[in-house]
Image (cartoon, grey):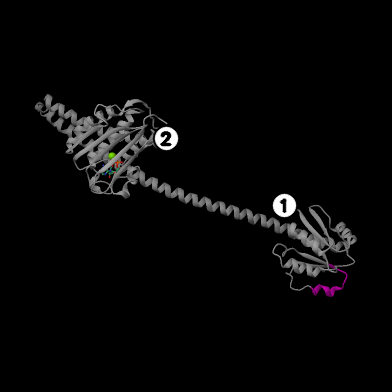
Amino acid sequence: MPHDVVSKLLLVDDLPENLFALEALVRGEGRQVFQATSAEQALALLLEHEFALALVDVQMPIMNGFELAEMMRGTERTRHIPIIFVSAAGRELNYAFKGYESGAVDFLQKPLDTHAVRSKVSVFVDLNRHRKALDREMEALAAAHRQQETLVQELRATQTELERAVRMRDDFMSMVSHELRTPLHTLYLEAQVRKLHLDRGNLANFEPDKLAAMVARDQHQIRNMVRLIDDMLDVTRMRRGALSIQPKPADLAALARRVVDGMAQQAEAADATISLQVLPDAESRIDGVWDEFRIEQVLTNLLTNAVRYGGGGAIEVSVRALGDAAEMTVRDRGPGIAPEDHARIFEQFERSADGRQHAGGLGLGLYITREIARRHGGDVTVESALGEGALFSVRLPRTPA
Ligand SMILES: Nc1ncnc2c1ncn2[C@@H]1O[C@H](COP(=O)(O)OP(=O)(O)OP(=O)(O)O)[C@@H](O)[C@H]1O
Ligand SMILES: [Mg+2]
């Protein structure tokens, strides 16, 4: 039983001396006694306080005790307050106030018997304490229940998220294995063939010109694997916010020339050509402060996509200064990207739904590209419709924010 519960008692009697005498009887530890000399005054107090019990004199002028009780019963706030009527009339009064919730009403007869008053009041006060304690427990229980509900909901959300993450990891693992397997397998086959030649003393296959082509093929496969692994590492770093960007003064035009030259062979193999337009003229410099290595990665990703998905043909790259920013675009004439996919392709591991286009790649290129652009204070956008090729534009502020 909590001891901090204070029980408020209301005494109503038109005669102050009665109130005085009654208060002396009911006063006690953990009780607070209020006096009212009229029903009106009692009602005012009833609205202000939460009473454990009201002791009401029946015979009062203007509004008698029963009428007061009637009014109390009509108000939600006071309806459940137990009442002890105090009256000089005989026992027949006991039945004069019918219909009041049973147990909530009792009677005391004048002249008051000290013991009867004390014990009746104690019963009600204890009852009130118990009820309050119970209320508190119920409240605590309800709060605990609510908390539990929230927790369960959070757990469910976490579970869904985890399931998604596990699925994504599985997909990712199978994609990575697949992507790494292809170049590794090629290398393995090459090595076997070479061993066979060596075993048979077939050295003609290792003449300088053939050797050069052999090394170039190996390099190509190895580069592919290194790129895949680098991409995975970059994404992990990006997710941790730990991708290092080291901006230094750079010339975007020179950078674009380098990347385009470097891609020429790959483009040729896909029957594509890459042209570069530097604006306003071929000799222009486009100076800014960027991490050259990362911006090269951006252009390389966009060009790799244009070569891979552009279906051969002309790929146009342009770079130009636009006031405080620089713009770099890559346009291809391939099958394009449906508008509803424009947002999706920039997400991790998102690739076109078209299986035919899965010519290798983890679906990380555009995610990395956009992250790098954003880390430079810029962004990448795409304009494309199915059958109309694709135009990717990168905007970069020339000085870091
Ligand atoms: N120029 C483009 N034309 C048509 N579709 C494109 C083009 N560029 C990207 N896409 C689509 O967007 C998807 C996501 O591209 P993204 O570069 O992020 O991944 P990826 O090329 O599949 O793999 P990764 O770049 O990691 O090797 C591609 O799988 C492709 O379906
Ligand atoms: Mg790509």
Q: Tell me if I can see residue 18 in this picture.
A: yes
| Residue type at tag 1 | Pro
Image location of residue 195, percent across then percent down = 15, 30
Q: Give the range drawn in magenta.
A: 86-96
Any mark on residue 2, and which? 1
Image x and y of residue 68, in percent: 78, 67
In the image: residue 146, left or right of residue 122: left
Query: Which label number is shown at residue 241?
Result: 2
Q: Nearer the viewer, residue 16 or 218?
A: 16
Residue 201: % across, % down: 10, 27
- C-alpha distance separating marks 1 and 2: 53 Å
Give the number of the mark in front: 1 or 2.
2
Quadrant where the image shows the C terminus? top left
Q: Quadrant of the rendered structure where residue 15 is?
A: bottom right
- State the residue in front, 4 or 356: 356
> In this orientation, which residue lies closer to the viewer: 167 or 318?
318
Residue appearing at x 32%, y 33% in the figure: 230
Q: Please give the count of numbered marks on the rendered protein.
A: 2
Q: Which mark is residue 329?
A: none
Check disc 2 and give the amino acid type.
Answer: Gly
Give SS at disc 1: loop
